[in-house]
Amino acid sequence: MNTEMTTDNLYRYLFENASVRGELVQLKNSYQEVISAHEYPLAIQKLLGELMAATSLLTATLKFSGDISVQLQGDGPVSLAVINGNNLQQLRGVSRWNGDISDGASLKQMFGKGYMVITLTPDDGERYQGVVALDKDTLAECLEDYFEQSEQLPTKIKLFADTKQAAGMFLQVLPTDGNHNGDFEHLSVLTETVKQEELFTLQAEEVLHRLYHEEEVRLFEPVEITFKCTCSKERSAQAIRTVSKDEVDAIIAEQGKVEMGCEYCNNKYTFDSIDVEAIYANAASSEVTQ
């Protein structure tokens, strides 16, 4: 049997004899796309890996088509870390920091007094936003706290990341009428024993067999996870339109061009004087036709 990990997949699973659901995510290429856009300190690379795994796991719980954003903010040297995703498991992310960040920096050392904002934006329906403090030792514990507050459902989360890979597991009681906390506690203890090395090197089936070999587990087909940035030259042109033409003309006169950079993927979009004239001419014509 080939036991080498298949990268960039999310797996959902159910226990046949317990009202508990689980998810397992393994990331490599999509994670590298996120952290390669900037020269992030080691601690931020790992944080983005954990955050990316967490966002994928949360996205899998969505019952709608739409977007999700998991954003960490604080008054410490790291002011922002965010992963945006959607129900198709297309993810992107970025972090902002100032100064030196030690390799082993904790959440509190990075964010100071911080909080996590989870925003769900369905294609159809109301936008939902939940906020929880970053007052636990790990991101996984903060997320468990979020579920305890928002859904009152017992939840277990494990997150791992190094500079090459990221992975995570999610366990949660299904919202049923019965009391299944005993089943959850038992399965949670088993899930707690998972090691980073197992999630980084083994196929999902092998990981689940090792953890739950005495349980009946139904594993569903994996969903591929991809890095996808939504930036484009058209979106950059729209951003330029929000600035007065006099300001943009001044930049053109000084630098010969206007350059717009994407924080997520580091792509650069360049506009010369002819491009700028066309941007504002198109904006004017669209206003006339409205």
Image: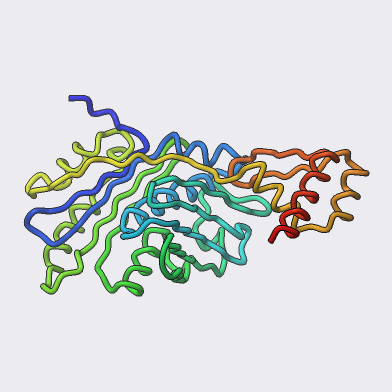
In the image, farthest residue toward the front:
289
Q: How is the image coloured?
A: rainbow
In the picture provided, is 253 more to the left or to the right than 193? Answer: right
Q: Residue at x 49, y 66 (%)?
A: 117
Where in the figure is residue 241, as x and y percent of width and height?
Answer: 75, 54
Q: Quadrant of residue 177?
A: bottom left
Query: Can residue 183 be seen in this snapshot?
Result: yes
Where in the figure is residue 55, as x and y percent of width and height?
Answer: 41, 54
In this view of the protein, which residue sits in the foreground, 85 or 165?
85
Where in the figure is residue 25, as x and y percent of width and height?
Answer: 32, 45
In the picture provided, is 125 more to the left or to the right than 187? Answer: right
Where in the figure is residue 106, as x and y percent of width and height?
Answer: 50, 57
Q: Residue at x 17, y 44 (%)?
A: 219
In this view of the protein, which residue sits in the foreground, 283 or 112?
283
Image quadrant occupied by the N terminus:
top left
In the picture provided, is 182 more to the left or to the right than 261? Answer: left
In this view of the protein, which residue sits in the foreground, 232 or 113?
232
Number of marks in picture: 0
Image quadrant occupied by the C terminus:
bottom right
In the picture provided, is 174 more to the left or to the right than 54? Answer: left
Query: Is the residue 271 above or below the residue 98 in the image?
Result: above
Query: Is the residue 36 above or below the residue 92 in the image?
Result: above
Q: Residue at x 80, y 49 (%)?
A: 281
In this view of the protein, which residue sits in the foreground, 106 or 59?
59
Query: Can residue 132 be seen in this snapshot?
Result: no
